[in-house]
């Protein structure tokens, strides 16, 4: 399953690059089909990042300690509630959650603006996907959540004890919803400036 997650992130990286290039090229050449293609690539990025999220969650729930991230943030004694929270309990998973929320917001923006704000949308899509590219590049090249250990440990280290509280479990996702949400008005501001 870790192979699926790693490959999905790499394809998401390529789709994000494609979205940026096609959105800007379509705007520059005045070709609406290229812009629509870029918007479809935004959907692809969301789908691929979702596959990576499910793959990491599956690795956590099945206690696949061959995956370094799983071994570092979970163990067999943890309740399922905290095993799910381990998805964002470390840096790699936290960045993946951040990216997934950004991709979700990007899909919502593209969907809601299918027939309005058409002169802004190429720049909005490009800005959102450039932001996603930052996180994808970090996840693919520096902080790979699907990195495998050379040996299979019998159990994991477990979640940080500070995070094993119900309020700390819901705090990071709520915080990310707000922080990542600021990317949307930023993208529209960049679109307005560029257009």
Image (cartoon, grey):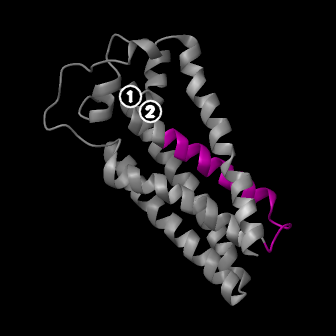
**Residue name at image x 75 percent, y 70 percent:** 193
Q: Which mark is residue 44?
A: none
Horizontal and vertical percent for residue 80? 46, 16
Q: Quick one: SS at disc 1?
A: helix
Pointer 2 with pointer 1, Cβ within 8 A: yes
Quadrant of res 55: top left
Q: Is residue 12 visible?
A: yes
**Residue name at image x 13 percent, y 33 percent:** 151
Give the left or right position of residue 119, taking residue 163 as reference: right
Horizontal and vertical percent for residue 85? 49, 23
Quadrant of res 8: bottom left
Instruction: Estimate how packed mark 2 is, as few (under 14), some (14 to 19) or many (20 or more) residues with alpha carbons within 10 Å.
Output: many
- The residue at the far right in this view is 116
Horizontal and vertical percent for residue 74? 35, 21
**Disc 1: which residue:** 60
Main SS of the magenta part reads: helix
Give the left or right position of residue 70, taking residue 175 as reference: left
Q: Quick one: SS at disc 2?
A: helix
**Disc 2: which residue:** 57
Cα–Cα gap, marks 2 and 1: 5 Å
- The stretch of residues the image draws in magenta is 96-119
Q: Quadrant of the N terminus?
A: top left
Quadrant of res 148: top left
| Above or below for 133 versus 148 | below
The number of discs equals: 2
- The residue at the far front in this view is 193
């Amino acid at each position: 399953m870790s192979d699926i997650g790693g490959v999905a992130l790499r394809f998401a990286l390529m789709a994000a690059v494609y979205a940026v290039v096609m959105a800007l090229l379509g705007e520059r050449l005045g070709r609406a089909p290229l812009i629509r293609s870029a918007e479809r690539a935004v959907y692809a990025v969301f789908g691929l990042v979702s596959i990576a999220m499910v793959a990491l969650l599956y690795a956590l729930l099945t206690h696949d300690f061959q995956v370094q991230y799983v071994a570092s943030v979970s163990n067999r004694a943890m309740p399922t509630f905290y095993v799910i929270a381990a998805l964002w309990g470390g840096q790699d998973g936290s960045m993946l959650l951040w990216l997934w929320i950004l991709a979700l917001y990007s899909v919502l923006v593209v969907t809601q603006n299918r027939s309005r704000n058409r002169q802004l949308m190429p720049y909005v899509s490009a800005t959102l996907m450039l932001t996603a590219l930052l996180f994808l590049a970090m996840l693919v090249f520096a902080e790979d959540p699907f990195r495998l250990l050379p040996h299979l440990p019998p159990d994991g280290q477990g979640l940080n004890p500070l995070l094993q509280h119900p309020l700390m479990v819901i705090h990071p996702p709520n915080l990310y919803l707000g922080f990542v949400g600021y990317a949307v008005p930023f993208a529209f501001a960049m679109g307005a400036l560029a257009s």
